[in-house]
Image (cartoon, helix red, strand yellow):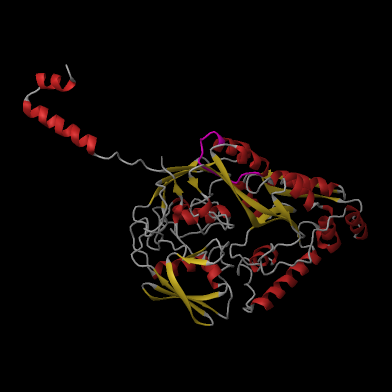
């Protein structure tokens, strides 16, 4: 007896027709599409949700997921409109931005010019960001969807700076919390409202956050960019500090996308079936800073030069970085206006010893050194190598390495005599290096402003001269420009959303579906 005959034998006719009709509909209905989820692992997770609390790569990566900038860099280092659909220069000191209409914040509030004005005013209060916005003397809402950015004199980097402007939800962040704290408060390593809550206009909302364990993101249903090709519904970011563990997670299929890929595992991923590697030449300079306020010897230029002569940048790049870095003698990489081709690494131990003797420090001295151990590629190993190299000129180093989240407060406090810092000019301009790494710190002003020369050739010569001056003064120890590498399983099409700024535009990521 067939199943249908059996049903006919035991069920009333009306019931049987209803069941057969339901079964027919069920067979005809298409299967419900499952959500597309990206499982990704970075070497660390963002230390805060407040995108103005800390200027770092991790914060900017988060910003591009949860917020949208006015404009953003494209792969050709030009500008694409985001929340600003167009812009024009009104006069020598004023740039006008025309904003998109119909954009919603995650809270449901409408985006308008007042949010841009509020955000820029908050950026100017941020210890980490105010230097970038020092040249801007005014920001005006011309109408609900037009904003003027005003400088006190012609400024060549208005659009560069605009890539930092991720409008925040001014209504959401206004007022006070239940315990009387201002919702717009900016404080490092503090439990502020903005550090725990977000309302941006970006492609993803924060669904759940367990600091140091994972962050879950979900696609924002009312996201304005309906032309984005991105098809990822959910993202789970898991911080995996250890390089080997992170790579193993990709190769085992536990992760779909990882960054960074350490130099020691590049070939391993290249040879593995089912995964692929994307590499790019980098523009992030890795350096050590010497604190002459803590070490009397560092006030002597000959000692600072000796430190530079004692360090083998070529060796570090070849042996520790496996060739996945370019030895540096300056901050500006090739291609930047300030890059000075005359400046080369100056490794010479004999010369270093001679300079130490001339300065009266032939017997050396002791210093403390700090470096992160999960922020830059091989950061702890590089610090150990530098400490060993300095021992050759009788500088004894007490080295301490810390996880990224613990290191940044120590760096801000200048807690050691030599400290590692890597810097990528997010304005893609040499002046950014000088602004943040070589100007004397000024807590009130956020240090000065960029060079205001707008003639490209003149400006390039001035920046190259600045690189030469810092080189001669040995104001810091440049090590190398760190290359970039990302790994993903096949079908996760990461290459179109990657860039030399290392801000993956994950809202546009496409994952092939079987």
Residue 37 showing in the rendered view? yes
The N terminus lies in quadrant: top left
Number of marks in picture: 0
Q: Is residue 136 above or below residue 183?
A: below
> Which one is nearer the viewer's eye here, 274 or 338?
274
Left of 467 or right of it: where is 10?
A: left
Residue 398 showing in the rendered view? no
Is 192 within the magenta?
no
Q: Is residue 269 above or below residue 282?
A: above
> Which one is nearer the viewer's eye here, 177 or 332?
332
Image position, residue 16 (x, y; %):
11, 27
Q: Residue at x 41, y 54 (%)?
A: 229
Q: Residue at x 64, y 79 (%)?
A: 455
Q: Is residue 279 above or below residue 2?
A: below
Left of 101 or right of it: where is 216?
A: right
Q: Which residues make up the magenta segment?
A: 251-262
> Which one is nearer the viewer's eye here, 190 or 447?
447
Q: Residue furthest front?
A: 1
Left of 190 or right of it: where is 379?
A: right
Image position, residue 372 (x, y; %):
66, 47
Image position, residue 99 (x, y; %):
40, 70
The C terminus lies in quadrant: top left
Q: Main secondary structure of the magenta part?
A: loop
Q: Residue furthest top?
A: 1
Q: Is residue 426 above or below residue 18?
A: below
Image position, residue 375 (x, y; %):
63, 48
Left of 474 or right of it: where is 147?
A: left
Q: Residue furthest bottom?
A: 91
């Amino acid at each position: 007896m067939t199943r249908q005959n059996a049903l006919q034998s035991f069920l009333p006719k009306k019931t049987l027709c209803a069941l057969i009709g339901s079964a027919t509909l069920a067979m005809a209905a298409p299967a419900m599409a499952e959500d597309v989820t990206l499982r990704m692992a970075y070497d660390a997770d963002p230390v805060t949700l407040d995108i103005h609390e800390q200027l770092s790569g991790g914060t900017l990566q988060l910003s591009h997921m949860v917020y949208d900038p006015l404009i953003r860099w494209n792969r050709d280092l030009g500008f694409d409109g985001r929340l600003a659909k167009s812009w024009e220069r009104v006069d020598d000191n004023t740039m006008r931005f025309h904003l998109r209409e119909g954009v919603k914040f995650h809270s449901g509030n409408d985006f308008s010019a007042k949010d841009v004005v509020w955000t820029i005013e908050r950026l100017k209060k941020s210890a980490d960001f105010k230097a970038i916005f020092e040249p801007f003397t005014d920001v005006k809402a011309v109408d609900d969807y037009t904003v003027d950015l005003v400088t006190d004199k012609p400024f060549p980097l208005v659009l560069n700076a605009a890539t930092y402007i991720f409008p925040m939800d001014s209504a959401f962040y206004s007022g006070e919390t239940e315990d009387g704290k201002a919702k717009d408060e900016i404080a490092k390593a503090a439990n502020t409202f903005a550090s725990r809550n977000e309302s941006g206009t970006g492609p993803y909302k924060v669904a759940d956050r367990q600091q140091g364990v994972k962050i879950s993101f979900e696609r924002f249903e009312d996201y304005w960019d309906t032309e984005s090709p991105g098809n990822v519904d959910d993202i789970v970011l898991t911080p995996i500090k250890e390089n080997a563990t992170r790579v193993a997670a990709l190769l085992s299929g536990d992760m779909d996308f990882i960054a960074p890929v350490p130099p020691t595992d590049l070939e391993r991923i290249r040879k593995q079936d089912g995964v692929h590697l994307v590499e790019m030449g980098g523009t992030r300079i890795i350096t050590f800073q010497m604190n002459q306020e803590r070490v009397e010897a560092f006030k002597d230029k000959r000692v600072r030069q000796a430190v530079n002569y004692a360090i083998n940048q070529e060796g570090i790049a070849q042996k520790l970085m496996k060739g996945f870095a370019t030895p540096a003698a300056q901050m500006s990489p090739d291609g930047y206006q300030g890059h000075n081709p005359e400046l080369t690494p100056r490794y010479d131990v004999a010369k270093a010893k001679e300079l130490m003797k001339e300065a009266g420090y032939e017997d050396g001295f002791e210093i403390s050194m700090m470096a992160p151990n999960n922020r830059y590629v091989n950061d702890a190993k590089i610090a150990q190598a530098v400490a060993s190299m300095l021992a050759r000129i009788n500088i004894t180093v007490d080295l301490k390495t810390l996880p990224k989240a613990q290191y940044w407060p120590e760096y801000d406090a200048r807690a050691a005599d030599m400290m590692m810092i890597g810097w990528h000019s997010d304005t893609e301009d040499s002046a950014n290096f000088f602004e943040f790494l070589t100007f004397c710190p000024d807590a009130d002003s956020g240090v000065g402003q960029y060079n205001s020369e707008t003639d490209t050739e003149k400006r390039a010569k001035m920046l190259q001269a600045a690189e030469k001056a810092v080189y001669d003064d040995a104001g810091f120890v440049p090590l190398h420009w760190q290359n970039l590498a990302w790994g993903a399983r096949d079908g996760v099409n990461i290459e179109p959303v990657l860039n030399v700024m290392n801000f993956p535009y994950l809202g546009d990521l496409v994952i092939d579906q079987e």
